[in-house]
Amino acid sequence: MNQAGVNEKYKVSPFYVYFLMHSMQTGLGVLNFQRDLAKATGTDGWISIILAGLIVHILIWLIYKIFSIVPGDIISANNHAWGKWVGNFFSLLFILYFFVLGMTIIIGYINVLHVWMFKEVPSWAFALVFLAMIYYIITGGFRTITGIAFLSVIVSFWLLFIPLYGFKYADFTSFLPIFDHTLIEIMKGTRSTSLSMLGFEMILMFYPFIKNPEASQKYAHGGALSTTLLLLLLYFVSTVFYSQKQLALTLWPTLTLTSIIELPFIQRFEYITVSWWNIVIITNMVLPLWAASRGIKRLFNVQQKYPLWVMFMIILLVNIFFFDLESLHILNKMINPYSVSFLVLYLPLLLVLLSIKKWRKRL
């Protein structure tokens, strides 16, 4: 057992961190990040994506440095740095963030289903099905969650042919001019890309579930690099497929791109993409809610199923009484950019505090 109370039999190999990282970062943001990026940076959006990727790699490095000082999870690190009461306050902020992130992803995907496929089906019906599936996976334990993450990455590789199909109608002059935007505009684009890059911070909770966790850092960076390359590919294809005005007005550029695909046996190919995306996005729904319920279990010493039930009730009630585009917009604003700014500011501060405490102990 380690500081976070994880038995060896529940741990996974370091190799699987690649799949946990990449599957968590590949979610709703992949469907529509191009729109906000095009508004901010136009043809220079690729620079913003590279910068966002570099920031993620730095934050992953910071997380592993934190856990090299305090083995465990973010709750152990917070308590070590701040003491019990202040540490628990910051831990509650992380738990709230994980919960809101999970709820945003569920509501966001239900919105996609409403717009593209099932307009008449009430949102609470979709929520009920997803919550039942999420509960089944979470109660199966972290190894089950890891298996789902592995599956979601493997079975989604065929989707890469969709952006490649877009080259058939590409106008490569649309990618010009380059280096045509100011640094401030590039940074705004980096901020708008951040929602697509979120997910790496889940390692703050599942770090104790990794065997020999120090060896998993290269796989965490590999997963983040794969996400960055995927976003670069999608943005490049979208830029040469749409005009800049079209890209700024298209709500879901990736899904709209799939609607041009026609096969002899199916004409509405976007239906396949939207349905298949459930397999891709399921890790996005499961891991944040697992992290939130795991955090409550650690803080208050209760069984994990009880906070899960409470969170599921809240999500279901939101879908029954408050589900609309405005509520989804508010949730997105809570997640991006405030949560990103919090992570960028808090993790370096936490590392500095832990390093000072470690240095004082040596004196």
Image (spheres, grey):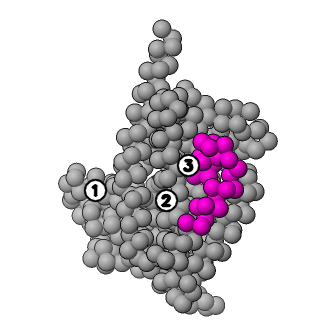
- Which dot marks residue 188? 1
Taking the image as drawn, is residue 319 in sight?
A: yes
**Quadrant showing the N terminus:** top right
Q: Nearer the viewer, residue 240 or 102?
A: 102
Dividing the picture into quarters, in which one does residue 327 lie? bottom left
Q: What element carries label 1?
A: helix
Q: Mark 3 highlights which residue?
A: 202
User: In the image, which is nearer the foreground, mark 2 or mark 1?
Assistant: 2
Left or right: residue 332 versus residue 20 is left
Q: What element carries label 2?
A: helix
What's the residue type where badge 2 is placed?
Answer: Val
Q: Measuring from the top left, give residue 15's x and y in whole percent.
A: 67, 45
Crowding at mark 2 (Cα within 10 Å: few <14, some 14-19, many 20+)? many
What's the residue type where badge 1 is placed?
Answer: Lys
Instruction: Reply yes or no: does residue 237 show up in magenta.
Output: no
What's the residue type where badge 3 is placed?
Answer: Met
Q: Mark 2 highlights which residue?
A: 100
Q: Which of marks 2 and 3 is nearer the N terminus?
A: 2
Instruction: Reply yes or no: does residue 301 show up in magenta.
Output: yes
Q: Give the range drawn in magenta.
A: 292-314
